[in-house]
Amino acid sequence: MQIPGITLPLAHLPVQLLALWIAGALHELGHAVAAASARVRVLGVGVFLWIMYPGAFVELDQRTLAESSTRNKLRIAFAGVWHNLILVAIAAAALKSGMLDWPWTWIGWETTATGVVATSIASWSPLHQAVPASSTITQLDDNTLAGGTVDWTRYLEKKTHLAPNTTGYCWSKDAWLSRKPDCQCCRFETVHVRCTYTSLVCFATYNSTSSSACVPVASALQDTTACTDDTVCPQHQVCMFPQRLSPGEQLLRIHYQLPPWSLDGATAADNQFTVFLGLPSDIYAAIRVSRWRPRLSWLPGTLPEFSVLFVR
C-alpha cells in the first residue's frame, strides 16, 4: 500500500493528490457523458477539496433518471468505473512501452545506466554540501548501482539491518602503525561530538580490537575495499573496523560523478568520493534519486520521475 510519509516519501503527496483528483474527475465525467447520451438531464458538475482530499461530482436530474430504462441506468452507474479502467489501461501501456521516456529525451534529459541521479538532497543532511544535486551516484561502498533505484534501495536496506562493526576496510599497515594509539576521537563515548569538528574516525584492527587509532577517514577509505578480516586484504594491509558508533550507525562510502555542466567533460566523468557516517535510513530520506539526469543546469531534475510517479 502506497502511503506518503509512511511507505513513500512525503514529497510524493502532491503528485498523488493530483493523480487522485484527475482520476476522480474522469470517473464523474463518465457518469455525465453516459447520462447525457441517455437523455438524462445533467444539472451540474464540479470539483471540491475536503480538507486534503480532492474530488469531483456530477448532479443528475432525478426525475428524468427515474424515467430512464434499466439499461440506461446501469450504463450511467458503471460509466465511471469504465472510464477508470480505460485510464488504467492507458497508463499501464505507457509505462510498459517506455512512451513516457520519449518527451523527456527530446527536451533536455537523458537516462543513465551507471547509477542513480541525486535529483535533490535535503538541506538538513550533511550530504547536501558534500554531493551536488544532479550528480550521478555510481557506487555505495564496493557495490555498483548499475541496477538503478532498485540497487540503491536494496543496498541501503541491507546496510540498515547490518550489525555494527561487521564491515571493515583494508588500509596500509605502515599507515596504521604510524597513527597515534591513543587519540582524542577514540576517547568519546560516541562519534557525534567528534563528527562536527574533524574528519577523524576511531578504528581498531581485526587482530587487536583493544588497540585503536584515529584515522583520516576520507583519504584512508578512498581507494580501499571492504573486508571481514586481514586475509581479505592485500599484503602489507590490515583490516580495520570503525569504533564508537552509535546504535544503527554505519560508515558508507559514496562514489559519484558531477553533473555535466559542473566541469569540463573529461573531469566531470571522473569519480568523486565522500564518506557518510550515520544512519543509512537518513541517506534514503535525504536523497531523492532517479534514472533521469538533466543536460542543462536550469532543468529541474525531479520532473521526469514525478511524471512516472503520477502515471503509476
Image: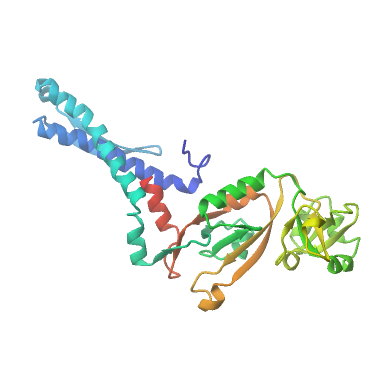
Q: Nearer the viewer, residue 194 or 305?
A: 305
Total tally of numbered discs in the picture: 0
Q: Against 260, is 214 above or below?
A: above
Q: Nearer the viewer, residue 53 or 217?
A: 217
Q: Nearer the viewer, residue 167 or 25?
A: 167
Q: Specify whether 242 is left or right of 273.
A: right
Quadrant location, the C terminus: top left
Quarter residue 41 falls in: top left
Picture coordinates of residue 201, whole percent (x, y) = 79, 59
Q: Residue at x 62, y 69 (%)?
A: 272
Q: Against 225, is 67 above or below?
A: above
Residue 47 can be seen in this image = no
Picture coordinates of residue 291, whole percent (x, y) = 47, 58
Quarter residue 105 falls in: bottom left
Q: Specify whether 39 is left or right of 224.
A: left
Q: Specify whether 199 is left or right of 54.
A: right
Residue 224 can be seen in this image = yes
Q: Specify whether 26 is left or right of 41.
A: right
Q: Residue at x 60, y 60 (%)?
A: 139
Picture coordinates of residue 249, whole percent (x, y) = 71, 49
Q: Residue at x 66, y 48 (%)?
A: 159
Picture coordinates of residue 217, whole percent (x, y) = 75, 63
Q: Against 72, is 277 above or below?
A: below
